[in-house]
Image (tube, grey):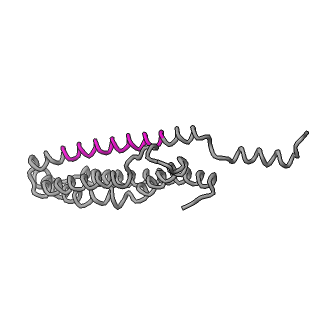
Amino acid sequence: MTEDPAKQAWQASVEIAGAPPLEAVRKGATKFYRYIWWRNLVEYAACVVVVGGFGTYIFTLPHLLQKIGSVLIILATLYVAWQLHRRASAVPPEAAGTMPLLLFARAQMVRQRDALRSIFGWYIAPFLPGMATFMTGTLIEKRASVGLGPIDAIGLAVMVAVFAGVWWLNQLGARRLQRHIDEIDALTGGSE
């Protein structure tokens, strides 16, 4: 008995638009978890380097503003590490419990997307007072000893470009995550 062609087309469209196999979702969730885990490990290692480096500056640099700036940068680094853990820590797929894995993966993507979107407030802004204080002390010290030159303006421009680049790259990452979230929403019929 031959089935109705309209029914066959409908069944084929359901297969195409259906959710991916559970194993593919599990692999994707595990891959995402590992990526976030490694990203955060690199961030935490960078925090250790920053705290160590600016910790030595407190005792070795001559100008009081350099020392105060170093303390502010260390405090900002500790704050950022705490915020990274709080906002964007890696949660393993096994933590999904009874929640469907696709919805768990979506929730983790939303969490990471939101952390990336708000990066200026919790990741960049905390460093600005310390960097401004540190650079002011450095420029005062340099002006007293050798004088200021165009390289100092270039250094400031590079610092601004780095902060802007970090913000921009994180916004790109947030948009990429949003596309994945939209794909899951299209499959499940859900949204925020």
Q: Position of residue 54 (x, y in %)?
A: 18, 48
Q: Is residue 49 magenta?
A: yes
| Quadrant assignment for the C terminus | bottom right
Identify the residue at horizontal 14%, vertical 52% (top origin): 142
| Displayed quadrant of residue 140 | bottom left
| Rendered view: 145 above or below 38 | below
Q: Residue furthest front?
A: 98
Q: Main secondary structure of the magenta part?
A: helix
Residue 86 in percent (x, y) is at 34, 54
* Magenta residues (range): 30-52
Q: Is residue 163 left or right of residue 174?
A: left
Is 164 located above or below residue 20 in the figure? Answer: below
Q: Position of residue 4 (x, y in %)?
A: 88, 46
Measured from the top left, where is residue 117 in percent x and y?
43, 58
Q: Is residue 192 found inside the magenta-colored segment of the image?
A: no
Residue 182's image quarter?
Answer: bottom right
Residue 176, visible in the rendered structure: no
Residue at image x 41%, y 56%? 115
Q: Is residue 85 visible?
A: yes
Query: Residue at left 29%, top 51%?
Result: 81
Q: Which is nearer the eye, 70 or 99?
A: 99
Give the position of the N terminus as an image quadrant. Answer: top right
Question: Looking at this view, is 27 or 147 the one in front?
Answer: 27
Give the left or right position of residue 92, taking residue 134 as reference: right
What residue is at 75 percent from the left and 47 percent from the top? 13
Count of picture labels: 0
In the image shown, does 87 or 80 lie closer to the viewer? 87
